Image (cartoon, rainbow, N blue to C red):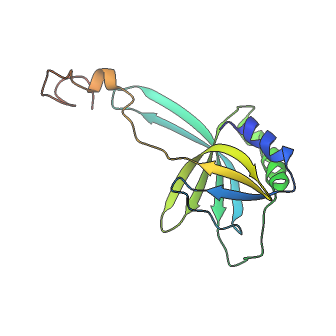
Amino acid sequence: MKSSSFVASLKQNPALNLRFVLPDGGLVPAHAHITEVGRVDKTFFDCGATFRKTSFLCLQAWVADDTDHRLPAGKLADIIDRAAPLFQGDDLDVELEYEDGFISQFPVHSVSIDGEWAVITLGTKHTDCLAKDICLAPSNEPEGCCSGSGCC
């Protein structure tokens, strides 16, 4: 979900508390704090020898002992608005960084309303080869990556 749509959804229901739903149906505890709002830029060199860059808006969730804490949608929208200079006018994909045994990043798929909650549904991220046309041998060739294909 792009940042503009995400913030607009939050502003439509500013008094509702946030509920983050993990891809497996589990929930981030309702008393989680959003401790960071930031732009993450990743510049990299892929296996096909191409330089690439990607950026996203990252929300970091942290669960503390303050079990009475609740973050209303409008307050998160205000926080993101205050961080707007970081985004340089770009409409970025939104991800939630959350730790439950290990740190994971989940793309925000949607925001919906369920009673008193603004429900934020999270998806999964996957690795991928960005140079399949170079790196993957045709199905009739047994060689693979690094077999002189120009990749790796």
- Name the residue furthest left: 142
Depth check, front residue: 150 or 26: 26
Depth check, front residue: 115 or 54: 115
Residue 126 in the image: above or below residue 89:
below
Q: Measuring 14% from the left and 28% from the top, which residue is drawn there?
A: 143
Question: Quadrant location of residue 49?
Answer: top left
Depth check, front residue: 116 or 59: 116
The quadrant of the rendering that contains the C terminus is: top left
- Name the residue furthest front: 115
Q: Measuring 61% from the left and 52% from the top, which residue is drawn there?
A: 96
Apparent side of residue 136 relative to residue 92 in the rendered image (left or right): left
Apparent side of residue 55 relative to residue 111 in the rendered image (left or right): left
Q: Position of residue 84 (x, y in %)?
A: 78, 41
Q: Position of residue 46 (x, y in %)?
A: 38, 32
Q: Measuring 80% from the left and 53% from the top, which residue is drawn there?
A: 73
Q: Measuring 40% from the left and 41% from the top, which residue is drawn there?
A: 127
